Amino acid sequence: MRISIIIPTRERAIYLRHCLRTVLDIEDDGIEIIVSDNASVDSTADVLAQIHDPRVKVINTGKRVSMRENFEFSLSHATGDYVIYIGDDDAFIPGQFRVLRNALETHRPDSLSWSIPTYGWPIEGFIGKAGGVRFEKKFLFGALQEVDMARIRAKLLSADFEDFQAPTLYHGAASRSFMERHRAANGIFFNGSSPDLYYTDLAILKGARHFDLCHPITISGKSAASTGAASNSKSIKANAENPATRFARESNADQVRDLVNFGTSVRGNFFQILETVRDITKIPEQPDYASWFKFILADHKGHDANEQRDVTERLRAYAKQIDQTDTLNRVLADRVSDVSRRRLSARWEKAKSKLQSFRLSAEMEGENTVHTAARLADIILGDGYRPDGSANRDALWKGARQRSSPFKKQF
């Protein structure tokens, strides 16, 4: 079985070099590593020129394109049975790749996801805990399970994202044959501005056979250059050239557009991709519009008053278009609060999980990067885990805690 690891990148050589080190550390000849350079003008070419691993394939878009176009471009060069996308500031945990291969070869799913710990790059401009990784028992050493996709479909349509075990292409494995079977009539697979969300919604609505692995295979790197971080940070958003602003500008220049546009709202983006997928695939089942309107309007994180007004007006226009104005007016009259952030049970579960966890500095030999974070994770996780659940989870957790003792704790 051949597995394609795809890394879209643009002018982030400072991160890319360390991301690539983690992937090159994987001891597996059955992978191809595709670096899709979005016409970078920094030192990206120099970083890539230093790599002489035959598993690496470097491609270049030739001109600046949107994230969606770069995903589509790189997919066209993939030859693997499965494709996995990660960001250029992310990492693979090399020693855990055998677990991923075992799960894919044993079950041949349409989609497989896993736990994703976070590493904050200790670089100027990043806001939040940086330079370390948290290990939570809840997300380690759990058995591989097939997900009830009827339940996930119902959750998606009602904007319920608690315990949402969704298929994902970004930090997840997708069957390329499944993707090819569900290309749209225009010959394009990614028909939404957010390619990872497009895949998620398509896989759910098309009933993909999806498995979830309660164990980490990759690490999500968060930096000042991350689009997600920029979307939620007022200080980063203040910069006119921040990643979120560039993402929006390039998406608007892309000829493939979403069915509707809800501006700067992250939750609105979730909804516009859902509506786009429904339109492309001609799925008649409608979402619970009241729940989705509440979900979008309740999110004030990173929004100023002008942005919130803009999102509301965009919702009004769309509600009128789909004959849901009365529904939206009822939601607005209720003056919704963000229930998902305030639900006590969810907060309590998160607090309990933190109690059975530890956070370690990723600094090793004077270096603190996503590469050292991946090395740290491999040491802590060890090699005793099996995705069939045959090993004792409590014993594996105890071993992880013991192996953590030499490393500096973070609080």
Image (cartoon, grey):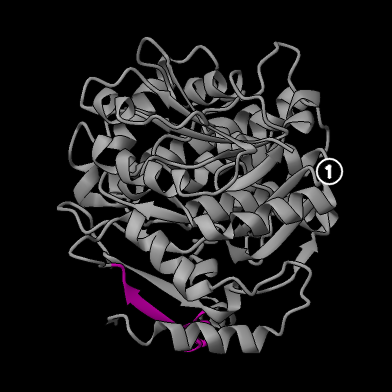
Kindly identify the residue that appears in the image at 44 percent across and 83 percent down. Answer: 403
Residue denoted by label 1: 207
Position of 256 compared to 404: left or right? right
314 or 97, which lies in front? 97
Q: Secondary structure at mark 1?
A: loop
When asked about the image quadrant of residue 375, the answer is bottom left
> Is 401 rendered above or below residue 139?
below
When asked about the image quadrant of residue 144, the answer is bottom right
On-image quarter of the C terminus? bottom left
The reply to whether residue 348 is in sight is: no
Position of 53 compared to 83: left or right? left
Kindly identify the residue that appears in the image at 29 percent across and 50 percent down. Answer: 223
Mark 1 belongs to which amino acid? Gly
Residue 341: image location, x then y, percent: 49, 69
Crowding near the residue tagged with mark 1, few <14, some 14–19, many ≥20 C-alpha atoms within 10 Å: some
On-image quarter of the N terminus? top right
The reply to whether residue 264 is in sight is: yes
Residue 366: image location, x then y, percent: 17, 64
Position of 102 compared to 344: left or right? right
Magenta-drawn segment: 350-362
160 or 326, which lies in front? 160
> Is 94 rendered above or below residue 162?
above
334 or 231, which lies in front? 231
